[in-house]
Amino acid sequence: QVQLVESGGGLVEAGGSLRLSCAASGSISSINAMGWYRQPPGKQRELVAKITSDSSTNYGDSVKDRFTISRDNAKNTMYLQMNSLKPDDTGVYYCNAEVPLDRVRRVAYWGQGTQVTVSS
């Protein structure tokens, strides 16, 4: 089992910055990849950024060059630095961790989510 707790959300004006944190606990050594997803109001959840155990990263097209994902293994914490925020970035941001069961199957763990609101 893996537990994830997000923090750092809030209200910010367009052009501003926020840093989200995701603290992981439990069977941390079993985690392969971690990521951030968001769910804008009335829309489906979408990938924001992902980082693997070897620190490879990938980003959603809408956040490239503005957001940076990182992880501090010593603190069991993942971060999302969000710069140049836009109103379209508004949504609930969820932390995700993937644990492989075998070569094909994976289990996904989710945090409770943190609200990010960007005002115009």
Image: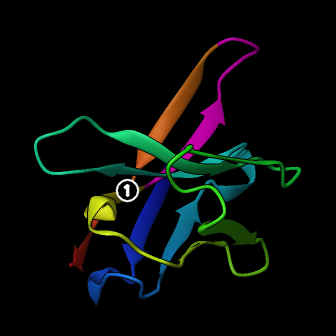
Quarter of the view holding residue 76: bottom right
Q: Amino acid at mark 1?
A: Tyr
Residue shown at the point (62%, 55%) measured from the top left: 64
Quarter of the view holding residue 88: bottom left
- Left or right for 104, reference 80: right
Q: Is residue 98 magenta?
A: yes
The residue carrying mark 1 is 94
Magenta range is 95-104
Is residue 103 positioned above or below 8 on the image? above
Residue shown at the point (39%, 84%) measured from the top left: 8
- Of 77 and 26, nearer the camera is 77
Main SS of the magenta part reads strand
Q: Position of residue 51 (x, y in %)?
A: 71, 51
Q: Position of residue 29 (x, y in %)?
A: 75, 53
Q: Is residue 56 magenta?
A: no
- Of 28 and 19, nearer the camera is 19
Q: Position of residue 53 (x, y in %)?
A: 81, 50
Residue shown at the point (56%, 43%) measured from the top left: 61
Which quadrant of the rendered structure holds the C terminus? Answer: bottom left
